[in-house]
Image (tube, rainbow, N blue to C red):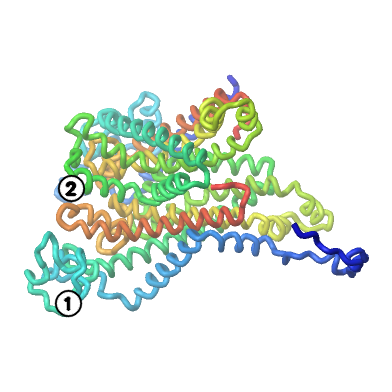
Amino acid sequence: MTATKLGPDAFKPVRVAATEKEKIAAPTLTFTQDALRRLRQNKAALLSLWVLLVIVVLAVVTQWWSPADPNAQNLAYAYLPPKWGQWHIPGFDGRLNGVDLYAQNRVPKAVYFLLGTDEYGRDLLSRIFVGTRVSLQIGFIATFFDLVIGVSYGLLSGWLGGRVDLLMQRVIEIISSVPSLVVVILMLLVFRPGMLSIILAIAVTGWITMARLVRAQTLQLKRLEYVLAAQTLGEPGLAIAWRHLLPNLSSTVIIQTMFTIPTAIFFEAFLSYIGIGIPAPAASLGTLLANGQQSLQTQPYLLIFPGIVIVVLMLAFNLLGDGLRDAFDPRTDR
Amino acid sequence: MGRYLLKRLGYLVLTLFIVASLTFFLMKGLPGTPFNNPKLPAEQIALLKTQYGLDQPVWRQYLQYLGGLMRGDFGTSYQFVGQPVSYLIASRLGPSLQIGLQAMIVGTSLGILLGAIAAIRQNTWVDAVATIFAIIGRSIPNFVFAALLQFLLAYQMHLFPVALWDDGWASSILPTLALAMAPLANTARFMRTEMVDVLNTDYIELARAKGDSQWQAVARHALRNSLIPIVTIIGPMTVDLMTGSLVVENVFAIPGIGEQFVKSITTNDYPVIMGLTLMYSFALTVVILIVDILYGLIDPRIRLTGEVA
């Protein structure tokens, strides 16, 4: 054991400047910066974000550069299995149960479909792109209603309180005691199946949870001192709600939005799947899946590929949502 | 308690009244008639209209409809001429209830098990596997999962009947599994959170300090306390099961109310749609009421008051 040699220097008082003493070593982070830092540590959420970005870019770009016309029918090319050029990848070599269907149907060598074709010879890959685009559109429209109706409804109800709150909450209670599915189906009956009626249905039912969460949070926030301060300074009520409460609600809103999107995507696919969503010639992940279901025994790839796409889409949104919640609200775990 | 119950029952009746009125007027507002077959002669259509009471003014039809509801009469189906809606629903309720209840039991019990194990083995590979399983379960749409089960276990391995409801209990296994996935994933997620919270409480620490092993502490103290909040997810779970039954019954061709609902929608059989809408709303409101009462009974800290939370 060696003793540390202490010279006389070690006993001199250390002089530290006053400013140095008060310095905070770690950089100060705003709430958002802190949340983003936590989000970056979450690998699953980051991966999901990248996957979603890729999907969004692909879905948007293929609106102009699609591998094939998603609605072009060619009965000569019906039910062709996936084929990737001349490569021999099992499952992607144009063979189904050992039979080369491309050779059997005398398809020219240069023609191949990456994910195969359906019963009308339409390219599955192109149709999946269209379906994904529909799903994403629905997701973003649902977000829009969630933000516009849900947030303002919850904010008004919580902020105004009293009788208005009571009435607004009874309305919410009644809407939510009807299964949203039933509301959606009623809307679809009134406004014929199609994109518009799905959107309207989401507009009626989709914002309930958001409104509830925002109201609960508003009730808590409006008792805080900064609200009192703003009131004392003579700021009008709604301006306080808008300028002071809303920014403090942002984490609740962001988190809830991330759960609204997959729910809406699921709903559209679900409705199209049971045949009351997007009508027949147009593609949506739901109609593709319903179609694939019918030929599951003979052409399983028609179900498998749209299935993978919707699962990946839902998984990515759910993981990102979980990640955002952990990042913005670290107290609640999972 | 008595007042609370009375108030809640009042809301239940009000809700159902609003739903019934809304669906009625929505259906009345729809363009066209159910009897738009151009081959039908005019007098035939007039006869049909009289038969269904459609020649009466709307307000009288409305009162008749409400009066019928009081007596349990939901009207007559358009699609199956002469069949009362109540009979149609009653005859198809069995399979749906069976699958729904089975799925609920399987889903919650497996979910509780999975969630509890994940919480006890927190931050280990067991936890990671359980969490991944729960997230995947939440992300696979039930119709994709149903089709997958059907393809792998029925077509490929021939373990279960592919579809239909004619093979006794065996026919209900795959639909139950398909339907149980969402409740399972949700319960597991919820249970894990609750269990982690409970395991961090002082009384668990006390139990460990007095010599309980980890498993003893879990079995005697943690499990029961973390089960209490699970009761609250029964409401949303019921909604999931109702929604799920629509597709699962279609995938497996089960003669249940979900399948009937979809059929009625595609054939514009308004009386049946109205009846089923009311039935779904009734079931959901009753379940939520029961859950709220149960919650108060299980956890004495929560007092039921006249206030509706």
Q: How many marks?
A: 2
Q: Residue furthest front?
A: A1
Most extreme residue toward the top is B2
Residue corresponding to mark 2: B156
Residue B20 in sight: no
Q: Secondary structure at mark 2?
A: helix
**What whole-number distance in Å separates the C-alpha atoms at marks 1 and 2?**
31 Å
Query: Is B149 displayed left or right of A227 in the figure?
Result: left
- Residue A111 is labelled as 1
Q: Which amino acid, by three-letter code, is at mark 2?
A: Gln
Query: Residue B174, image x and y in percent?
Result: 26, 39
Name the amino acid, label 1.
Val
| Up-down relation of residue B66 to residue B242 (above or below) | above
Between B272 and B168, the residue placed more toward the observer is B168
Percent from the top left, x then y, of residue B10?
A: 53, 28
What residue do we see at 49% from left, 35% from top?
Answer: B15
Q: Residue at x 27, y 31 (%)?
A: B95
Vertical relation: B65 (above or below) A318: above
